[in-house]
Image (spheres, helix red, strand yellow):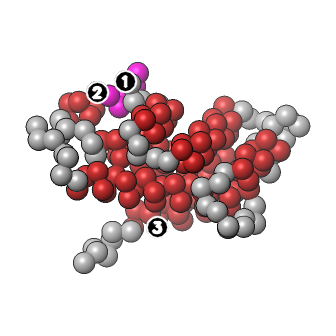
């Protein structure tokens, strides 16, 4: 039986995303994916808190979204399609995080040309139509998050887990 608060974290997160600006939504959704990738990678590590903490700390080998994407793909935790989409999502997040204005000197938004085009090029979900670039970005992030979460659960409960 699933506890009543099992989905509370996700529901609260979704509610927070809906209240965010485009910039806030892009950064939070990408961070959500980065956190899930880190958890997925941890699911294959031996149970050593010291090791887990060191590799994910600042300047550690798994301290960046990019390094987590590369390792998750190299270990077969994500498909080539999700690998490519995660790299696009990371770049979109970086644009929002590091640019105040778009090339037309407007505030960065999902309707900025370069952002919009990349959001619509995300193809984790086939056959779904989107009513905005923000919707395309959000739905693709949710799909990839679910995919990573399933892989993480499979890894955690697999028999290949090493003892301390």
Q: How many marks?
A: 3
Q: Residues under labels 1 and 2: Cα distance?
A: 6 Å
Of the numbered discs 3 and 2, the one sitting upstream in the chain is 3
- Residue 120, magenta (yes or no): no
Classify 10 Å Cα crowding around label 3: few (below 14), some (14-19), many (20 and above): few
Vertical side of 61 occupied by 2: above or below: below
Q: Position of residue 159 (x, y in %)?
A: 18, 52
Judged from the image, the secondary structure of the residue bearing numbered disc 3 is: helix
- Residue 56, magenta (yes or no): yes
Q: Which residue is mark 1?
A: 60
Q: Which residue is mark 3?
A: 11
- Quadrant (top left, top right, bottom left, bottom right) of the N terminus: bottom left
Assess whether mark 2 and mark 1 are in contact (beta carbons under 8 angstroms): yes
Vertical side of 29 occupied by 55: above or below: above
**Mark closer to the observer (1, 3):** 1
Q: Which residues are magenta?
A: 54-60
Q: Which residue is mark 2?
A: 54
Q: Is residue 152 left or right of residue 15?
A: left
Name the residue located 46 percent from the left edge and 39 percent from the top edge. 73
Judged from the image, the secondary structure of the residue bearing numbered disc 1 is: loop
Q: Residues under labels 3 and 2: Cα distance?
A: 31 Å
């Amino acid at each position: 039986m699933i506890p009543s608060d099992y989905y509370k974290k996700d529901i609260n997160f979704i509610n927070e995303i809906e209240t965010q600006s485009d910039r806030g939504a892009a950064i939070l959704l990408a961070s959500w994916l980065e956190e899930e990738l880190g958890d997925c990678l941890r699911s294959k590590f031996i149970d050593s808190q010291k090791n887990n903490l060191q590799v994910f700390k600042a300047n550690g080998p798994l301290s960046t979204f990019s390094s987590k994407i590369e390792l998750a793909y190299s270990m077969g935790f994500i498909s080539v399609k999700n690998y490519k989409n995660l790299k696009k999502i990371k770049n979109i997040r970086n644009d929002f995080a590091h640019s105040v204005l778009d090339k037309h000197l407007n505030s960065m938004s999902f309707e900025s040309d370069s952002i919009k085009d990349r959001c619509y090029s995300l193809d984790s979900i086939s056959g779904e139509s989107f009513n905005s670039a923000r919707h395309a970005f959000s739905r693709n992030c949710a799909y990839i998050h679910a995919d990573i979460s399933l892989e993480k659960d499979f890894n955690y409960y697999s028999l290949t887990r090493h003892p301390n």
